[in-house]
Image (cartoon, rainbow, N blue to C red):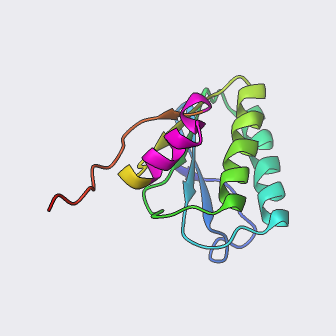
Amino acid sequence: MNNLPNNNISSVPVLFLAENNAITVKLRPGRLPHATASSLLKTLVEESKRGDYRILKLDFTEIENVSSPILGFCVDIRNRAVALGMSVDMIGVNSQLNEIFKLMRLDRLFNIVNVKNDFIVA
C-alpha cells in the first residue's frame, strides 16, 4: 500500500492510500480547511492519471460524527472520481452515520459497504 503525498500528514484529517486498482481516502477526526480539500482533490486527479484506479474508497472507520465541510468534501471527491470513471464506496461507516446518510439520501450517491454494527441494545 502506497501513501500518496500529503502536504503535512500530521495536520491533515485525510490520508490517501493507493493499492491495486483502488485509492482509499482515510478520513480522520479533525477540521478540513478548504485549501487542504482543494489540494486533496487535485492529488486524486493527478494520482488517478498515474495508475489504473477504478475504485475510490472513503474510509470512515475513525469517524464517529461528520460535519458539513467533510460531507461537502466527500461529495466533491465523489464527483471528481465519477468523472474519472471510478466507482465510489464508503467503508467503515458506523450505524448512526449510515442512518444519517440514508436520511440525506447520500446512499444514492455512494455505495455504502462494511457498515459497523454498533447499536447498543438495552
Corner quadrant of residue 114 = top left
Would residue 105 be counted in the magenta stretch? Answer: yes
Q: Nearer the viewer, residue 14 or 79?
A: 79
Q: Quadrant of the C terminus?
A: bottom left
Q: Is residue 82 above or below residue 58?
A: above
| Residue drawn at 83 percent across, 56 percent down | 38
Q: Is residue 87 above or below residue 92?
A: above
Q: Residue furthest left?
A: 122
Corner quadrant of residue 61 = bottom left
| Residue drawn at 70 percent across, 43 percent down | 75
Q: Is residue 56 above or below residue 11?
A: above
Corner quadrant of residue 119 = bottom left
Q: Is residue 41 above or below residue 87?
A: below
Q: Nearer the viewer, residue 55 or 111?
A: 111
Viewed as shown, does residue 54 lie left or right of 92? Answer: right
Where residue 115 appears, as percent x and y from the top left, is: 36, 44
* Boundaries of the magenta span: 97-109
| Residue drawn at 56 percent across, 59 percent down | 27
Where residue 109 appears, as percent x and y from the top left, is: 62, 31
